[in-house]
Image (cartoon, helix red, strand yellow):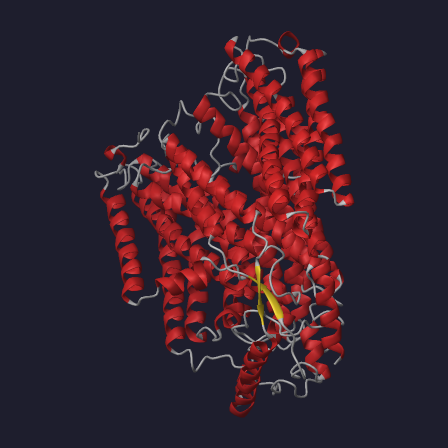
Amino acid sequence: MATTDASMHDEIQAEASQGTVVNFGFWIYLMSDVIIFSMLFAGFVVLSTSYAGGPTGRELFELPGVFLETLALLFSSLTYGLVMISLRQGNKRRVQGWLLVTFLLGACFIGLELHEFLSLALEGHGPQRSGFLSAFFTLVGTHGTHVTFGLLWILVMVGQVAYKGLTPAVASRLTRLSLFWHFLDIVWIAVFSTVYLGGMYR
Amino acid sequence: MLGRLSLDAIPYDNGIIMFAVALMAIVGVVAVGSTTYLGKWGYLYKEWLTSVDHKKIGIMYIILAFVFLLRGFVDALMMRAQQATAGPGHSGYLPPEHFAELFTGHGTMMILFVAMPLIIGIINIAVPPQIGARDVAFPFMNSISLWLTYAGGLLIMASLAVGQFSTAGWTGYAPFSEYPANPSTGVDYWIWALQISGIGTTLTGINFLVTILRERAPGMTLMRMPIFTWTALITMIMVVLAFPALTVALGMLTLDRLFDFHFFTGGMGGNQMMYINMFWIWGHPEVYIVILPAFGVFSEVTATFCNKRLFGYRTMVYATMVIALLSFTVWVHHFFTMGQGPLRNTVFAISTMVIGIPTGVKIYNWMATMFRGRIEFKQPMLWTLGFILLFTVGGMTGVMLAIPGIDYKVHNSEFLVAHFHNVLIPGTIFGMFAGYTYWFPKAFGFRLDEQWGRRAFWGWTIGFTVAFMPLYVLGAMGMPRRMVSYSNPAWTPWLWVAAFGALIVLYGIACQVVQLLVSIKNRDRLADLTGDPWGGRTLEWAMSSPPAEYNFAVIPTVHGIDAFMEMKEQGTAYQQPAEYSDIHMPKSTPAGLVIGAGAFVFGFGVIWWIWWLAILGGLTMLASVIWRACTDDVEFTIPAAEVKRVEDERFRKLALAGQRGDVIDTGSRGRMPFGGDMTGLHPG
């Protein structure tokens, strides 16, 4: 029967495209995350001069440290690109290796960010000091929280690659982790431009 | 160890609350007791709580909605009683704090835990089969959404017994919702109920957006989708765009309250207007999120019960899109009086009034569908007619409120209360009741009793009118909203009328409860053996009622709008295929339930500053997600032989229905049973 043939064909197609359906869903999730960050950016811009007598961004920010953070994160995107190339080559060890390098670079980023946060807080410039600092810590901290979950995800994937090998399911998950990781990079470019560069000239 | 939780948190001294708690406890004990007595825990766990089947998830959403509808309505009755008796020289029977909790709880519950779960529940039941799909794109995520919504609802329930609920209104404006003004747990309960269920809703949005765009049956192009599916798609796009804004606004408020941040505080650089902007950037689209699916239901119902193709399919789709787009450009009209200046107010006033145009297009489309149609006055159609009449009034007063000059006079008055109830009750609630009566036989295999349904309809329609028209008058007389007592004797008679109207609505709700019981009792007589009790036009009616787990044994191929009607006309609707193939379906999993439980524990811990408990809840969620992320084997196979057995049974039932002549009783126009002659039913 014609309908049966059509539906079987459809089913085969559906199975083949299951990965792309999940990836599409993940894209939509990322778009919802764009809204989260947009709101945080909008909030930051609204409060960007609400110093309440406290320090300004220009007085607080130390660009060399932020530059190092940026380098770490951007290079981690490069190394994640190498994860995907190794995946395509089917080289399990190299996938794991580059995942670990990406993890280390991401961890450096988080370490530097925590260092910045702690030193600000210890000098009395914590998020409680002013609306500006609340918005600063929340925006940058939300990005940092995303990166932290990304690090956790990398570890999970290192484990999955080790135990399951480069199966289609694992490869599909690595693709989405790649989307997530590059997305965080792009958000960081916006953070760097708006918060730090903007703060230096505000 | 227990944060700020102590025995003082239980409001012993408030008799009304203790009575409600006792009632809740009794219902809980009876539910647990009877499940144990009947030995149904295994069934409940295996078939429902861990299910990822969109049909069951939809039903569980609707159960949640009805529980909260009852609670929210009791709050409404109490408020009406208070305002009727709290005139000059009287203080009524409620203390101001309790009254404030009531209007906050009523608004929060009705929007987030009645309207939303009803909509999501009905979308769950109707949309996958309307597009010829076997399930949603992400069945497991669907289960997470459900249990996150339950977790939020449970927090509201818990606030009744432990601590208190927010007194800051459902909008929770800062700085009143900030810690210095409102240090109790009320606002925190409100925040976490919204936050947790809101994240669940965002996931639903992603899920259905992907489902509708990627899981349609072959041949179903976008412009062949049923209108309800269209409205669901556009609603879900709005959900994905709007709900993250709520997440952020609530997150900032949480940081303010818990960690002394200064987003919305008075002083220290906080900006209170930012909260109001951020809230309504979500809040206004939310208004359309709850109305557009109702428009979709009305479209389906009108076409079905007028036995005509919907008039102006394309304009309906475009009108829905335009409403969705405009809904993101009008949020300032919620606070014209807060000093943006005339230019900005004018821009937002115009964008608000413009929404009347696509909405008007829809109203005319429905009327044109009815024109020269053969209208069957069944329950879903009654709700639709009530909607068209009453909603138009609400829409008109909305345009009035959109004029800043008028808004300055009636802002935050009972006029506003009358307006939004006038769009939400005849719009959303009637729409969901129409959907409930329309798709009930699909979900359960039997129809709802007509007689009691009619009584419910008249109770709601008359009750609504009597309860809310006086509020327009009161608003024009200058009565502000949310008054626990007042000194103007001229208001009292109108408030008594409103209270009486609420009692008529109570009659309507009672009829709905009776209707459900009567229908269950008479389920054999009301049985829908064909799967097509109304002469439906869209694919969900091609399935049996209730549908098999896999919905469609063979995925249908679609050739036009109103796919099922076309199949019936061509005589291809009820042909049993020669053979079946294996079907892969998603496996049940407890992970969604565990994540929901974790979210509840997390929320409760944060509300009461019991940090170890919050960490425990958070880790539970994280561990479940990771465990699930490492699971590859998420499907099972229904063998072709089993499919054949189920389908043979279905065709046996169809033959029985043919013998009993069941289908003929759905109309006096001599419509033939399935597969029969359908000509002449398709004018224009």
Left or right position of A113 against B48: right
- List x then y, in percent, for residue B237: 66, 48
Q: Nearer the viewer, residue A99 or B58?
A: A99
The number of numbered badges drawn on the structure is 0
Where is B511 relative to B326, above or below?
A: below
Q: Residue furthest front?
A: A93
Q: Quadrant of residue A1?
A: bottom right
Q: Nearer the viewer, residue A76 or B451?
A: A76
Query: Which quadrant of the figure has residue A73?
Result: top right
In this rendering, position of residue B37 left or right of residue B359: left
Q: Is residue B675 above or below residue B245?
A: below
* Residue B643 spot, x, y in % from top left: 58, 76
- Asked if residue A118 can be seen in this view, the reply is yes
**Quadrant containing the N terminus of chain B in the rendered view:** top left
- Rendering quarter of residue B567: bottom right
* Residue shown at 69% from the left, 61% from the top: A15
Tell me if residue B234 comes above or below residue B389 in the rendering: above
Give percent across and percent down for residue B134.
61, 66
- The x, y position of residue A81, in whole percent, is 76, 35
Q: Is residue B372 visible?
A: no
Location of the C terminus of chain B by quadrant is bottom right
Which residue does the image show at 52% across and 89% down from the upper left? B656
